[in-house]
C-alpha cells in the first residue's frame, strides 16, 4: 500500500502545470479571482486561493492575461482575460497535454510510436 | 478600522513591491470579502467565516513571497553545490593555516606553549568568518536577478574511483595524531608537569638528563613512525618491507624505553622529593618494571597484529 504522503506529493506534481492550462482556458471568458476559483473547482480543478491569486498576477506580468477593473458592482473587482499571446501559448500547451495523453495510452497498450 | 482582514492585508503587503501594493491590496481585499460572503451566504457567522478564510489563505509572508515571486530559501539548488564545495575547500586549510601562523608568531614572541590557545581561538574565528561571508555572498547572488555563469559539469571532472584500501584513512589519521601528541608531550612535560617543587618550580616527570641524547633520539624515532604511517596510507596496503620498517621503529622506541625504565633512569629523581612513594628504591623498581612490561606487551601485540594484516594483504 502506497503511503498517503507519497501519493499526495505525486498527485501535486502531476496537477501543478495543469492549473495554468485550466486558468487560460477558463479565462477565455473574463472573470475575477474568486469566481474563477469556484469555476475551476466546479470543473474538477481544486486550487488553493493562495496559489491562484499570485498565479494570475504572474500570468498577467508575462503578458498571457490582460486585466480590467470593474467598478460597477458592490466592490471593485479585477477581471482577467486570456490575451492573444496567452491563447497561442495555451494552444501549444494543449497540444502537449494531448501528446502526453497519447504517449501514455500508447505505452499502456504497448504500441511503438 | 482594524479587523482581522485589515491586519492580514497589512501583514501581506508589507513585503510586496511598493509600486503594486495598492492594486494588490484592493484586489486581495475584494477576494477575501468574496470568500467571506460566500460562507456567510451559506449561514456561517461572519467572524467565524473571516477567521476561516484567512486561515485558508495561510501565512501572509508566504502569500507575499508568492506575489513577489520571491525565493523562500537561503541558497537554492542552483548554487548550493558550488557553495558547499567552496566552503569545504576554504575551511579545509585557511583556519588551520592562519591559526598556525598566529601560534608561530606567539612562540617567536616567547610565549612558549601558551601560543597554542590563541592559535586555536584565531582559527575558530577565521572559520566562522569564512562560513558567514561565503554564505552571505551566495544568499545575495541567489536573490539578485543576475545569473552567474557557472561552468557546466563534464565527464572529465569525474574523480578516480576509490581503490580498495587495506589501510583506512581514519586509522592513519588516528595513528599520526597519537604520534604527534606523544612527541609534543615530551618537551611539554619538561615545562608543565603539574608537579611542583617546594618553591613552586616545575618538576619534569622524565629525567632532564635524558635530553642530552635519549629523548631527542626517541623523538626522531616517533617522527619516523609518523612518516611511515603516511607512506603506508599512500601505498594502500601492507608489505613485508613496511612490516620490517615498522618492527624496527617499534623496537627502536620500546627497547630504549624498557632499558631506561629497568635501570631506573627514566623518571626524574627530583620527583621523589614531592612524591614520597617514589623516594623508596623498591617502589621505583616496581614502577620501572611495570613500565617495561607494559611497553613490551604493546610492542609484541602490535607486531603480531601487523604481521597478521601483512600476511592477509600480501596473500
Image (cartoon, helix red, strand yellow):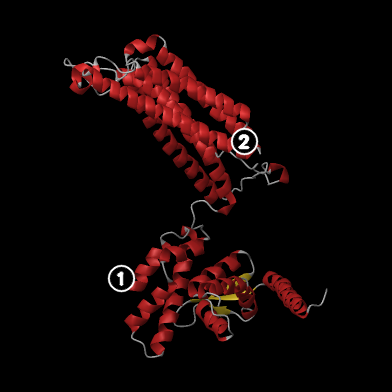
Please tell me whether residue B19 is drawn above or below residue B52 in the rendered image: above
Q: Residue furthest top?
A: B212
* Rendered location of residue A24, percent (x, y): 64, 75
Marked residue nearer the N-terminal end (2 or 1) = 1
Residue ID for mark 1: B2
Task: Report whether residue B119 is seen.
Answer: no
Distance between the Cα atoms at labels 2 and 1?
73 Å
B267 on left or right of B179: left
Q: Residue furthest left?
A: B198
- Closest to the observer: A16 or B250? B250
B240 on left or right of B13: right
Q: Residues within 10 Å of mark 1 (few under 14, many from 20)?
A: few
Q: Which residue shows up at 24% across the image and 17% down it?
A: B281
* Rendered location of residue B265, percent (x, y): 33, 14
A40 on left or right of B45: right
Q: Which quadrant: the N terminus of chain B?
A: bottom left
* Rendered location of residue B91, percent (x, y): 49, 36
Q: Can you tell which mark lies on residue B236?
A: 2
Q: Which residue shows up at 35% across the image and 26% down it?
A: B291
Report helix, strand or loop for mark 1: loop
- Closest to the observer: A73 or B300? B300
Q: Which quadrant: the C terminus of chain B?
A: top right
Q: Which residue shows up at 56% across the image and 34% down it?
A: B307
Please tell me whether residue A95 is drawn above or below residue B168 in the rendered image: below
Amino acid at each position: 500500500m502506497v503511503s498517503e504522503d507519497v501519493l499526495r506529493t505525486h498527485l501535486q506534481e502531476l496537477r501543478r502545470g495543469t492549473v495554468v492550462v485550466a486558468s487560460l482556458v477558463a479565462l477565455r471568458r473574463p472573470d475575477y479571482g474568486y469566481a474563477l476559483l469556484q469555476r475551476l473547482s466546479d470543473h474538477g480543478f481544486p486550487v488553493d486561493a493562495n496559489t491562484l491569486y499570485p498565479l494570475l498576477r504572474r500570468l498577467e506580468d508575462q503578458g498571457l492575461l490582460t486585466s480590467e477593473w470593474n467598478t460597477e458592482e458592490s466592490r471593485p473587482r479585477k477581471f482577467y482575460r486570456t490575451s492573444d499571446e496567452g491563447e497561442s501559448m495555451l494552444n501549444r500547451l494543449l497540444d502537449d497535454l494531448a501528446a502526453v495523453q497519447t504517449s501514455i495510452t500508447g505505452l499502456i497498450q504497448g504500441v511503438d510510436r | 478600522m482594524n479587523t482581522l482582514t485589515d491586519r492580514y492585508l497589512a501583514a501581506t503587503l508589507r513585503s510586496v513591491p511598493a509600486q503594486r501594493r495598492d492594486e494588490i491590496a484592493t484586489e486581495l481585499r475584494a477576494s477575501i470579502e468574496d470568500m467571506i460572503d460566500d460562507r456567510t451566504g451559506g449561514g456561517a457567522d461572519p467572524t467565524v467565516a473571516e477567521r476561516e478564510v484567512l486561515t485558508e489563505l495561510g501565512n501572509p509572508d508566504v502569500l507575499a513571497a508568492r506575489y513577489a515571486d520571491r525565493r523562500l530559501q537561503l541558497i537554492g539548488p542552483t548554487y548550493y553545490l558550488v557553495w558547499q564545495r567552496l566552503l569545504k575547500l576554504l575551511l579545509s586549510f585557511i583556519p588551520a593555516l592562519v591559526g598556525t601562523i598566529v601560534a608561530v608568531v606567539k612562540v617567536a614572541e616567547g610565549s612558549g606553549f601558551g601560543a597554542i590557545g590563541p592559535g586555536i581561538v584565531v582559527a575558530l574565528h577565521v572559520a566562522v568568518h569564512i562560513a558567514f561571508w561565503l554564505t552571505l555572498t551566495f544568499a545575495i547572488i541567489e536573490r539578485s536577478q543576475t545569473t552567474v555563469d557557472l561552468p557546466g559539469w563534464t565527464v572529465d571532472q569525474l574523480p578516480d574511483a576509490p581503490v580498495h584500501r587495506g589501510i583506512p584513512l581514519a586509522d592513519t589519521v588516528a595513528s599520526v595524531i597519537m604520534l604527534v601528541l606523544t612527541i609534543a608531550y615530551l618537551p611539554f612535560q619538561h615545562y608543565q608537569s603539574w608537579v611542583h617543587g617546594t618553591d613552586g618550580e616545575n618538576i619534569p616527570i622524565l629525567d632532564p638528563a635524558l635530553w642530552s641524547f635519549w629523548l631527542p633520539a626517541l623523538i626522531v624515532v616517533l617522527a619516523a613512525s609518523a612518516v611511515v604511517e603516511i607512506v603506508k596510507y599512500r601505498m594502500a596496503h601492507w608489505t613485508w618491507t613496511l612490516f620490517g620498517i615498522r618492527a624496527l621503529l617499534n623496537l627502536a622506541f620500546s627497547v630504549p624505553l624498557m632499558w631506561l625504565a629497568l635501570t631506573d633512569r627514566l623518571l626524574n629523581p627530583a620527583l621523589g622529593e614531592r612524591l614520597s612513594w617514589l623516594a623508596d628504591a623498591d617502589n621505583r623498581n616496581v614502577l620501572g618494571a611495570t613500565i617495561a612490561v607494559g611497553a613490551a606487551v604493546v610492542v609484541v601485540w602490535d607486531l603480531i597484529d601487523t604481521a597478521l594484516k601483512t600476511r592477509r594483504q600480501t596473500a
